[in-house]
Amino acid sequence: MLKNIISLLILIFLITINQWLWSRFDPKVNYLQFYLNNGSLIGIITAIVVISWGDLNKHVGLISPKPHRYLML
């Protein structure tokens, strides 16, 4: 139970830092506007990475069954 609470607090901390950095460097554009402006570029880059990486099903280590392990120090 304590691990879940600590993981949640770490996640909230990271979200807060992300929001603070986003508003500090570009206060006029929010997330939705950013993705509407850059969605096609994000999609093309994602497609290129997936094609170049190969079959993603062979890389089972990309998805962790217990992601809280990576957040714990």
Image (spheres, rainbow, N blue to C red):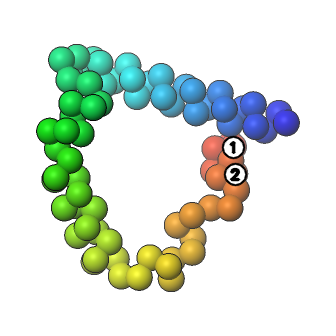
Q: Which mark is residue 69?
A: 2
Residue 19 at x, y percent in the picture? 39, 23
Please tell me how crowded label 1 is: few (under 14), some (14-19), or many (20+) other residues with Cα within 10 Å.
Answer: few
Q: Residue at x 78, y 38 (%)?
A: 3
> What is the quadrant of residue 8 in the picture?
top right
Determine whether the residue tagged by mark 2 lies in a helix, strand or loop. Answer: helix
Q: In this figure, which residue is indicated by the disc labeled 1? A: 72
Left or right relative to 66: residue 3 = right
Name which residue type carries label 1. Met
How many marks the image carries: the answer is 2
Above or below for 60 versus 64? below
Q: Residue at x 75, y 31 (%)?
A: 5
Q: CA distance from mark 1 to mark 2?
A: 5 Å
> What is the quadrant of residue 28 in the picture?
top left
Name which residue type carries label 2. Arg
Residue 45 at x, y percent in the picture? 22, 61
Q: Are marks 1 and 2 in contact (CB under 8 Å)?
A: yes
